[in-house]
Amino acid sequence: MEDNKKLAQQQRDNLISELSDNILKTAKTIVRPEDGDRKVGEIAAEIRQRLSFEANVLLNEAVTRLSPARLYKEITDAPQRTFQRFGKNFRFQHALMFISVIILIITGMPLKFPTLGISKFIVVDVFGGLENSTLIHRIGAVGLIFVGVWHLGYITISRFGRRDFLLMIPRPGDIKDFFHTLMFFVGRRSSGPKFGRFSFIEKFDYWAVYWGMVIMIGSGIIMWFKEWFPKYLYDIGREAHSDEGLLATLAIVIWHFYNVHFNPDVFPMSWVWWHGNLTEDEMKHHHPLEYAEIIEAESKRIIEQQEKLEQAGSDEK
Amino acid sequence: MKVLKFLPVLALLAVTAFAADDECLRCHGQTAAAKESGAPTVMIEALAGSIHSGLGCNDCHNVNPNIKHVGTADILCGKCHLEAAEGYARSPHVKGREVSLEDIPTCITCHGGHEILATDNPESVTNHRNSVKICIKCHEDESLRAKFDILPEPQMIKAYENSVHGRALMVEGNMDAPACVDCHGSHSFMPSDDPESPVFKTHISGTCGACHAEIAGEYNSSVHGAALAEGILESPTCTDCHGEHDIKAHLDPDSRVYTTNVPKTCSDCHTSEKVVGKFGLKPDRIATFNESYHGVAIELGATNFANCASCHGVHNIYPQSDPRSLINAANIEQTCGRCHDDLPADFAKGTVHTSASDKSSGGKFYVRKFYIWFISILILGFIIYRILEYKRRVKRVQ
């Protein structure tokens, strides 16, 4: 273990010195001759320092994320109390939705970029022709429409669904939180905002999907049943479907995949979609206001119960 | 009994001929004495089996047997085969003889010498099927091409062997399939830039029409055929779409007119600045087709989707204003209806070649505009947010 660490350190140092030599060479050509070697040396030293720092940061992140020690630590940590974030119903919706969306992206993107080699590979070699890939696209579409209808039922019929939907509605506080976060990022605030059950990021995610579902399902139905609509509406529907599809794909890859996969806090993946639970630490860190509410409600209940017991005791007397 | 009248004359001719032949064979026969003389020998058996077996030496060789003669004898095929000789006189082969005597074919190069057989004899080297080999023998010879740079690319000539015509004739033995001479004309073989050549652009539909009469008729009345008839040489004829020596059946995926290759073939002219600009055609027809779902499907190799010809016609392409045109307002519904069963009446009347980058396409243009801005701003926002977040993260670790 110790040897490995030393070896890694050695390799890193070698890499840094090699990189710095290259930079030194480049720096020499851009420094004015009258500044001389001293200036070059200064620049190189600064760059070397910076490189060494960046490399350390990245390496530390990687090591702490991936090292067996971390996993071991997580297993041996005292079992924490867990809080359910997503119920079974919601997890089912999410799973069916991402399966459908992945199918839709794979079979849909080639139609947006038909001249690319990979598009031809997917349609012709993987699916064996456009007829098959469009059939599978429609199967995915049925899955997505099913999720949409299911979700509308969920947010009206289910008690949890209704509560979560009401909490999802954007509030002025979300805009404040957003600017607070930016201020925190640029260093004008010492800490980020405290979130309740849904942060402004999660609300954005939810409503982006809401908007996307409306556009994609609406325009998809126009194309599917084109004989019911005039040609100009078909044209608009196809354009909107194609562009919104691209937007959705980019948003999923750049935004959502970062949040739940590539973010160093959760890399390689957050498992909340599977078990639906957050630990107490995670609750305190990511949803402090919700955590406080839960604890407050619990303590109130306990106090009430105790009071009731005391009351009962005094009545008996 | 006309022949009877000539009988004595023929008999006399025969006698004199044979008399002369005996004299010739004294030196040119296959006797020991003849061999000693060193004169070239005649394969007398071959001559006997040939179509010319009734002819005497002097009918072809214009020599006086009584004088000692050396060198090549004159050959007088044209004496009897007048038409063929006239054709040959106009051929590039004859012109080539001014440059080189030994490499350029004459009558015997193709037809053979004493052993010559009638062309309709299946054994004949000039029989329909065999004649291809004669032409290819010289025209695929790289060394000849090096010598005469005017010769066409051997690759192009050889492509015939893999063409639908070549395979039908050479492999399947369909004697109706054309050999070289059927398109290029026998004996005269005029190059395609000679206005009298059967393969000159304005004559091609006639040449192909010799076999494909119905199609040629349809083509001649089409916008392309009519333009060509008016002397517009840019207008395509059969070979511009189907290919020449390499012509393939339209169901062959390598064919230029195979369903997925049609847009590419049409685009050769319909995206060409030279054609589109000169004749005021709409330059975006191919681009808008590629943008349409039909175009996307064709691009991805689907064979049951509309290409250019599905709507505009194949050989029978007319301007939209022509009532015969498949895309004329009177016919468009029927044309769309060939693939789409239950389209509403107004569906087919929408504009077809629309582009999202063109305002005239209506809503589509504004949808595209909106999304270009929407996607750009949103993605830029995402990226900036991530960069700021990363910087903060680095700071925290620091």
Image (cartoon, rainbow, N blue to C red):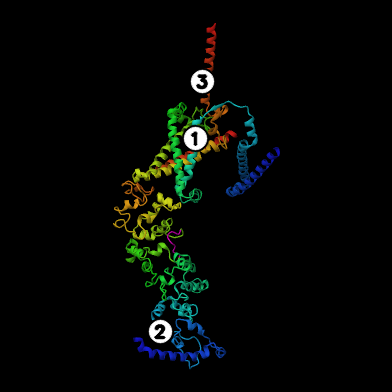
Pinpoint residue A14: horizontal percent, then vertical percent.
66, 44
Residue B22 spot, x, y in % from top left = 49, 91
Real-space CA distance between mark 3 and mark 2, rounded to the nearest whole angstrom: 122 Å
A296, above or below A153, in the image: above
- Residues packed near mark 1 inside 10 Å, few (<14), some (14 to 19) or many (20 plus): some
How far apart are the alpha carbons under marks 3 and 1?
29 Å
Give left or right: position of A231 versus A311. Answer: left
* In the image: residue B365, left or right of residue A176: left
What is the tally of numbered marks visible in this picture? 3
Per the image, label 1 sits on a secondary structure element best described as helix
Answer whether labels 2 and 1 touch (C-beta < 8 Å).
no
- Kindly identify which residue carries mark 3: A297
Q: What residue is disc 2 on?
A: B79
Q: Chain of mark 3?
A: A
- The kind of secondary structure element at disc 3 is helix
- Report if residue B124 lies within the magenta region: no
Mark in the foreground, 3 or 2: 2
Q: Chain of mark 2?
A: B
Label 2 – label 1 distance at C-alpha: 94 Å
Q: Nearer the viewer, residue B64 or B387?
A: B64
Quadrant of the snapshot with the C terminus of chain B: top right
Read off the magenta span.
B246-252
Name of the residue lying farthest toward the right: A3
Tag 3 near tag 2, CB within 8 Å: no
Q: Are marks 3 and 1 in contact (CB under 8 Å)?
A: no
Magenta residues, dominant SS class: loop
Q: Can residue B22 be seen here? A: yes
Sequence-wise first label, 3 or 1: 1
- Comparing B172 with B369, the one in front is B172
Q: Nearer the viewer, residue A130 or B102?
A: A130
